Amino acid sequence: MSAEKKDDIAAGGYFSIPAGLGFPVTTKIFTPEKFTEEQKMAAETAKKFIEKDVLPKLAAIDEQTGGDYGITVGLLKKVADMGFLGTDVAEEYGGSGLDFTTAMCVSEVFGAGGSWAVSWAAHSGIGTHPILFFGNEAQKKKYLPKLVSGEWTGAFGATEPEAGTDLYGAKTKATLSPDGKSYILNGSKTFISNSGFANLFVILAKIDGDPKKSACFIVEKGTPGFTVGKEESKMGICGSSTCPLNLVDVQVPAENLLGEIGKGIHIIFNTLNLGRLKLGAMTTGSGKSVINDAVKYAVERKQFGLPISQFGMIKEKLANMVVGAWMTESAVYRTAGLVEEKFNATDFKDFTQTLDALREYEIECAILKVAGSEMFWYIADENVQVHGGYGYIKDYLAERYLRDARINRIFEGTNEINRLTAILNMLERAGKGKLPLAKAGAALAAQLEESAGEELPDEPLALQAELVNGMKKMFFVAGGRVLEKFPVREKIVAQQEILRRLSDMLILIYLSESGLLRVKEHGGEIQEAIVKLYVQNAALECEKLAKEVLAFLEEGDMLKSYLGRLKRLGRPLANNLLDSVSLERKIADKLIESKKYFL
Ligand SMILES: Cc1cc2nc3c(=O)[nH]c(=O)nc-3n(C[C@H](O)[C@H](O)[C@H](O)COP(=O)(O)OP(=O)(O)OC[C@H]3O[C@@H](n4cnc5c(N)ncnc54)[C@H](O)[C@@H]3O)c2cc1C
């Protein structure tokens, strides 16, 4: 391992799991409290736009389905003038040239914009990023100014009818013309966002159908043989455009090949990493917006002579909504900070460095895609419940929020695939010696006998710090044992139910640690209550997950011995269980008093 990589790990780069084995090297993370004035201003401007121009038009935007998408395109042009189609695109290509974190702040705010937000994200993210990161100078100069100014809209065509999750199975074929001047593309794509009105499409294909020669092409609308099919009728995000594409002998100039032959699939996957992280930010923003809807209704609606916000079971829902949004936000911006650092150290003119930079935090990006989309779904679902029968009626926002929330668990890679991405990458890094997982698991056995359950240090949040370390140790015990039992990748991937459990542990650990580090640095009474509640529940859940993994792997005395280790790791909690109900009440009361998301 290079010295540079070692330092990266020590700095908490690789998710800080190894660093946390009793030696939490990562103590400082990027948090929203550290936003610069520029970042705050961008978020504020974006917020004014969403509140004034998008939220009042959500119904009208949804009714455009199949039409010319005039409202959506008009609003895209409007945000282009504000610099929000190219927030992190360099000024030389017409962008605003701001940092990645600013782009994340804008994503969070725009997340509340329902169908319009999906069109915006498909355009400025997956529709623009492949060219931004992998285009050559001529391609960037030709296309980025058009995309960033809103003159053109972008789309991203990877999925095919027979190849959704399994993009390696994509069949769209590209053949070099006899004169070498163009590629001839044949195939079909499905479910392509923005396709009803997009001018430019990044299309994944394989040269001569050879799986080793995947390649991406920039295809302009109107190219003969390229047709956009009928608009899909969807459950939610109804005002976004989703159509199939058909390519019959589409002649694409050879200079529209993006990046290198053989790297097309990597361009797609690594572009998706950023998309997943931004989806984490967008769902955080959506979640906060739905919380506002929930608390407003709960305060106004009376039953039994009281606002329903006064009932304990409603308070419990409101509190857990806030916990979900704040904890996800903590992990989102922690990761944004890590990506920002990596980007600052990357020469984006170098293809390999670019791929590496986008890949570096793919575990965290996958975690946040899952955590964000499931948090938003939970909040949207509970908001319907808070609204009772009215939540089921289309006149109320709650109904739309729920339908719109559902897609986030499916696109940008389904949550099943993102769970696998997170854990398999983690295990692979461990297998290659980048993370000393198995070694750490073995070393832990000795430590366990002595340390767990000792007196907690007399310092704030000592229990929560102990619980986060305990969860990591549980992950080492269970994950390390999985690696020992299934040392070959093919054997591990066949154990999906086990991988799902390990992946859920990773998600709980990453969010717990992010929230804990944030509150340790910035304090806050409600924030402390949030972290205490989340970490306690996460620790209980982690122990259950680790037990399930070990019960699958072991039996008899061996199983007893492993369960004994987990029990010892769970001892700090068993001896210091906090009162969750009072914590929930405290958080809910503050939300009710504020009548809106207040953190
Ligand atoms: C509204 C909308 C917008 C979209 N926008 C775009 C876009 O702009 N560009 C684009 O290219 N695509 C887009 N997609 C496609 C989207 O990314 C795919 O639908 C998604 O990746 C899943 O593929 P699939 O639908 O073929 O499902 P499948 O791959 O058939 O999956 C079906 C189920 O099986 C599970 N599954 C599949 N493989 C595995 C496995 N190995 N292990 C465990 N479980 C597995 C999945 O998680 C899922 O639950 C969009 C889809 C929708 C609905």
Image (cartoon, helix red, strand yellow):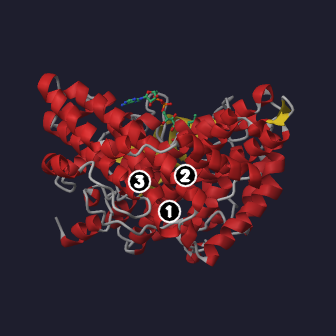
Q: Going 63% across and 38% down the picture, which residue do you hit?
A: 316
Q: Going 78% across and 63% down the picture, which residue do you hit?
A: 48
Q: Where is residue 547, by image quadrant?
A: top left
| Disc 1 from disc 2: Cα separation | 9 Å
Amino acid bearing label 3: Gln
Identify the mark nearer the N-term, 2 or 3: 3
What residue does disc 1 label?
A: 519
Q: Which mark is residue 464?
A: 3
- In this view, the residue in front, 182 or 191, is 191
Question: Label 2 CB, ligand 1: below 8 Å?
Answer: no
Amino acid bearing label 2: Ile
- In this view, the residue in front, 472 or 356, is 472
Q: Position of residue 343 (x, y in %)?
A: 42, 69
Amino acid bearing label 1: Val
Q: Is residue 460 above or below residue 474?
A: below
- In this view, the residue in front, 84 or 43, is 43
Q: Are marks 1 and 2 in contact (CB under 8 Å)?
A: yes
Helix or strand or loop: what does disc 3 sit on? helix
Identify the mark nearer the N-term, 1 or 2: 1
| Disc 1 from disc 3: Cα separation | 11 Å
| Disc 2 from disc 3: Cα separation | 11 Å
Question: How dense is the environment of label 2, judged by Cα within 10 Å: few (below 14), some, or many (20 and up)?
Answer: many
What residue does disc 2 label?
A: 530
Is 37 placed left or right of 276 in the picture?
right
Is 455 placed left or right of 279 in the picture?
left
Callout in the foreground (1, 3): 3
Q: Position of residue 370 (x, y in %)?
A: 48, 42
- In this view, the residue in front, 206 or 409, is 409
Q: Going 40% across and 59% down the picture, which residue do you hit?
A: 358
Q: Is residue 319 above or below residue 102?
A: above
The answer to whether residue 215 shows anywhere in this view is: no
